[in-house]
Amino acid sequence: MAKRIFVVEDNALNLRLFCDLLAAHGHETCAVRDGREAFAKALDYLPDLIITDIQLPYVSGFDLIRQFRQEETLAHVPIMAVTAYAGPGDEERIRAAGANIYVSKPISVVKFMAVVNDLFALSAGKSHDDSDPEEVASA
Ligand code: MN
């Protein structure tokens, strides 16, 4: 089923790649290159998934992720962070900010779509009333 995916990425080529890939898999995208516009646009778009770059001009991807998590209407939307410079400790920082997962750039097309589908499966699992709470907690 088509999903609404919000993409924050300042690099035009990466942005195009992500959006083309997601569109080719039947999803709708809303793209933002300027991180300063990201929060208001995400609130307006109400996506099923947020994909955000970490290295953005003007705004840190970490701060953006924290902002999304603090906003009630976006708090439960899965977040996938993409970064070209994941050093030691960065994965923990990205997760601590509130992202579900990070993928390093340059992306592998197969890995990228696999992660997107995993995140949709995760959020679908969370909405089942009869799901085993322990199973969900460990997902
Ligand atoms: Mn960037």
Image: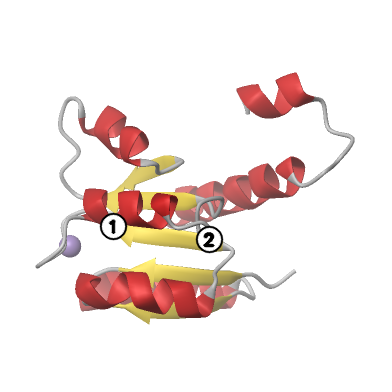
What distance separates the C-alpha of mark 2 from that of mark 1?
14 Å
Which dot marks residue 49? 2
**Mark positioned earlier in the residue sequence (2 or 1):** 2
**Amino acid type, mark 2:** Leu
Task: Work out whether residue 105 can be spotted.
Answer: no
Picture quadrant of residue 12: bottom left
For this view, does 40 lie left or right of residue 122? left
Which dot marks residue 8? none
- The reply to whether discs 2 and 1 touch (Cβ–Cβ < 8 Å) is no
Q: Which residue is mark 1?
A: 64
**How many numbered marks, from 0 up?**
2
Q: Quadrant of the N terminus?
A: bottom right
- The residue depicted at 54 percent of the width and 72 percent of the height is 46
Q: Quadrant of the C terminus?
A: top right
Where on the image, by quarter, is ligand 1?
Answer: bottom left
**Depth check: 21 or 119 in front?**
119
**Depth check: 39 or 34 in front?**
39
Which color scheme is applied?
secondary structure
Q: Secondary structure at mark 2?
A: strand
Horizontal and vertical percent position of residue 114: 56, 49
